[in-house]
Image (cartoon, helix red, strand yellow):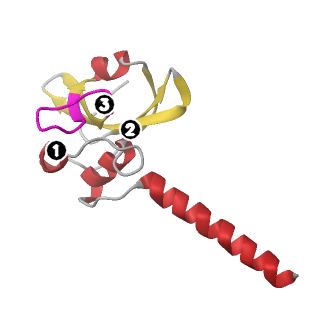
Amino acid sequence: MQFKTGDIVKARVLSMPNIIHSGIVLMRDDTILVAHNTPSKKNPAGGNTVIETMNAFLDAGREIIRVRETQLNYEQIMNAFHEIKHVPFNLLEFNCDDFVYYVRTGKRRSSLLTMFKKRLLRNISAIEKSKRKK
């Protein structure tokens, strides 16, 4: 598989097949690196966002299922990494998808909390509609 800097990789976690992990590729000479946010590793700044080789990323029990090309360059990714590297992993508030989103946009968001809020609003709306029909 050919990679280039800025590619967003989605990988299935083999021990938990319903879990998808995200990272961003960085090419340094001929070495393929992946920047990602993971609860299993800590960086020197105290956060869980790390940069490691693609082999280390995959050896942690992951299998790449999708690659999406972006226009992100090495400097943009590294700047975002350094801005956010102190933030610890939090499944609801700062997970691997949230790190990728931050690198792409420069904005913080919680993908899971957003999803939960949308589902909650849909459920409330459905309940309100059913009450009005009665």
> Crowding near pointer 3: few (<14 within 10 Å), some, many (20+)?
some
Residue sitting at x 73%, y 78%: 128
Please name which of the two marks, 2 or 3, marks the residue nearer to the observer.
2
Please name which of the two marks, 2 or 1, marks the residue nearer to the observer.
1
> Crowding near pointer 2: few (<14 within 10 Å), some, many (20+)?
many
- Ranked by sequence position, the earlier of labels 2 and 1 is 2
Question: Which amino acid, mark 2?
Answer: Ser
Residue that numbered label 3 is attached to: 3
Question: Which amino acid, mark 1?
Answer: His
- The numbered mark at residue 86 is 1
- The quarter of the rendered structure image containing the C terminus is bottom right
For marks 2 and 3, give the CA distance: 15 Å
Residue that numbered label 2 is attached to: 22
Residue 127, picture quadrant: bottom right
Left or right: 21 in relation to 38: right
Q: Which residues are magenta?
A: 38-51
Left or right: 12 in relation to 58: right
- Say whether marks 1 and 3 touch (CB < 8 Å): no
- Ranked by sequence position, the earlier of labels 1 and 3 is 3
